[in-house]
């Protein structure tokens, strides 16, 4: 498929098959939120999936197709997304004492004809050395119109599902408890 | 236990199969498809072009969205086009992905607003072998935001454009102009939206190209390009 077809008229020219999600890109609103926050530079630690969502960590069924993470794990994808946004916002320091880790707790999407819905939840843990400064679950969900035609429904599902990741990060960064914990000496 | 949903699922599957076949026929007839863009946007007129004397380095961020949801897949194709347009516009200096010392940032969001009925139109064109033509396209909101320095008030401009494909015997609305192919259509849309957006930003009274660091040796800028 020509490269412009991903951009132009996905409804007419796009394919029905879904490939893996691309590597995390810049989410400008998320980056602006992080850059404007009082967060000090942070290191990103491990992001893993809870045992209960081990299957959902590898693939999300979307009608007859599936959305897959670029690196084999949606939990790692969340960590990579966080790393990309922090780096671009100038708030990533891999050697920082402040380390943010996470556990994927829920990862789900339904794309019936008419209305589709997806949700994502993770527990974030912020540590400095052996001290846990913050431990809280954040969750986001999104609903969108789902076309009868898969060629329209699949790109819409991919975009809507993918947008949960920056939304979850934004929810974390907007949590005053998280910012206060990050500023704890 | 018998699953009572099975017959309904089978019917749904058959309906989807027929629709997909019609769409495929529609795509097959796309051999004579033509591509059109909104002709009302056009180029920035030479006498309206703002010249920036000292373009400042910025962090450049590019995001593609579908209906407002971040969708990075087309960025591999789109980002080099945006970068080339930003470079040729001359409104900002050197740019890259990383933050710059001044905190200056230029962000470009390309929001694709798909035609919700496009697949149905394509299927109908296929079923009628192009006799019932289809004109379907996507609208694009290109949102350009320039932040002169960390903490400064951002300047935002949104430029709207449209790109459409005509299949079969469809009527093209007035104001649309044909382009040679889809790739040229995308490039023209990006060129025109970014040229207008960046030029308007450069003409905004809040635009400070030297990122709030005045250069006394610099030649004077023309009205509208600096405070």
Image (cartoon, coloured by chain):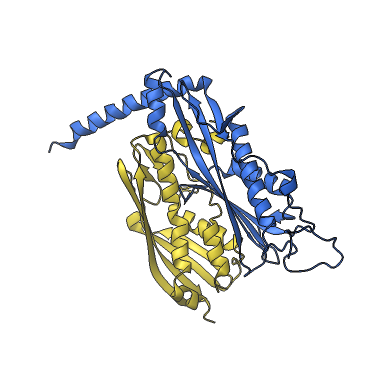
Chain colours: A yellow, B blue
Give x and y (percent) for residue B55: 76, 57
- Residue B184 vertical position relative to residue A90 in the rendered view, above or below: above
Give x and y (percent) for residue B145: 60, 57
Q: Residue at x 85, y 60 (%)?
A: B219
Query: Looking at this view, is B187 or B222 the one in front?
Result: B222
- Looking at the image, the residue that sits furthest to the right is B217
- Looking at the image, the residue that sits furthest to the left is B1
* Residue B133 picture quarter: top left
Give x and y (percent) for residue B152: 63, 68
Is any part of residue A68 visible from this angle? no
* Residue A134 picture quarter: bottom left
Q: Residue at x 33, y 36 (%)?
A: A148
- Residue B73 vertical position relative to residue A181 in the rendered view, above or below: above
- Residue A10 vertical position relative to residue A181 in the rendered view, above or below: above
Is residue B157 found left or right of A78 in the rendered image?
Answer: right
Image quarter hosting the C terminus of chain B: bottom right
């Amino acid at each position: 498929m020509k490269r412009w077809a991903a951009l132009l008229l996905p409804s007419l020219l796009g394919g029905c098959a879904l490939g893996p999600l691309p590597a995390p890109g810049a989410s400008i609103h998320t980056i602006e939120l992080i850059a404007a926050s009082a967060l000090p530079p942070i290191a990103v630690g491990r992001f893993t999936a809870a045992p209960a969502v081990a299957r959902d960590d590898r693939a999300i069924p979307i009608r007859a197709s599936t959305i897959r993470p670029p690196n084999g794990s949606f939990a790692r994808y969340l960590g990579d997304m966080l790393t990309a946004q922090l780096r671009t916002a100038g708030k990533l320091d891999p050697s920082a004492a402040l380390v943010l880790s996470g556990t994927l707790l829920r990862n789900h999407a339904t794309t019936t004809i008419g209305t589709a819905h997806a949700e994502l939840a993770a527990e974030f843990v912020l540590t400095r050395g052996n001290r846990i400064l913050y431990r809280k679950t954040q969750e986001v969900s999104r609903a969108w119109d789902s076309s009868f035609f898969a060629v329209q429904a699949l790109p819409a599902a991919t975009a809507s599902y993918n947008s949960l990741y920056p939304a979850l990060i934004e929810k974390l960064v907007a949590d005053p408890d998280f910012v206060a914990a990050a500023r704890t000496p | 236990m018998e699953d009572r949903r099975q017959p309904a699922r089978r019917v749904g599957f058959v309906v989807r199969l027929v629709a997909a076949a019609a769409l495929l026929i529609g795509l097959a007839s796309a051999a004579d498809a033509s591509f059109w863009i909104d002709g009302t946007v056009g180029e920035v007129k030479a006498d309206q072009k703002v010249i920036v004397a000292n373009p400042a380095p910025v962090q450049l961020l590019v995001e593609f969205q579908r209906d407002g949801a971040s969708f990075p897949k087309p960025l591999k194709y789109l980002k080099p086009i945006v970068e080339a347009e930003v470079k040729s516009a001359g409104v900002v200096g050197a740019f890259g992905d990383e933050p710059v010392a001044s905190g200056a940032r230029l962000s470009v969001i390309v929001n694709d607003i798909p035609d919700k009925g496009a697949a149905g139109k394509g299927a109908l064109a296929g079923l009628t072998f192009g006799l019932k033509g289809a004109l379907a396209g996507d609208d694009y909101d290109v949102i350009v935001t320039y932040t002169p320095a960390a903490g400064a008030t951002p300047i935002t401009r949104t430029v709207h454009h449209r790109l459409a494909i005509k299949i079969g015997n469809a009527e093209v609305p007035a104001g649309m102009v044909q382009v040679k192919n889809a790739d040229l259509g995308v490039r023209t849309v990006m060129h025109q939206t970014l040229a207008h957006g960046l030029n308007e930003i450069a003409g905004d009274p809040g635009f400070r190209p030297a990122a709030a660091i005045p250069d006394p040796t610099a030649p004077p800028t023309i009205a509208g390009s600096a405070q």
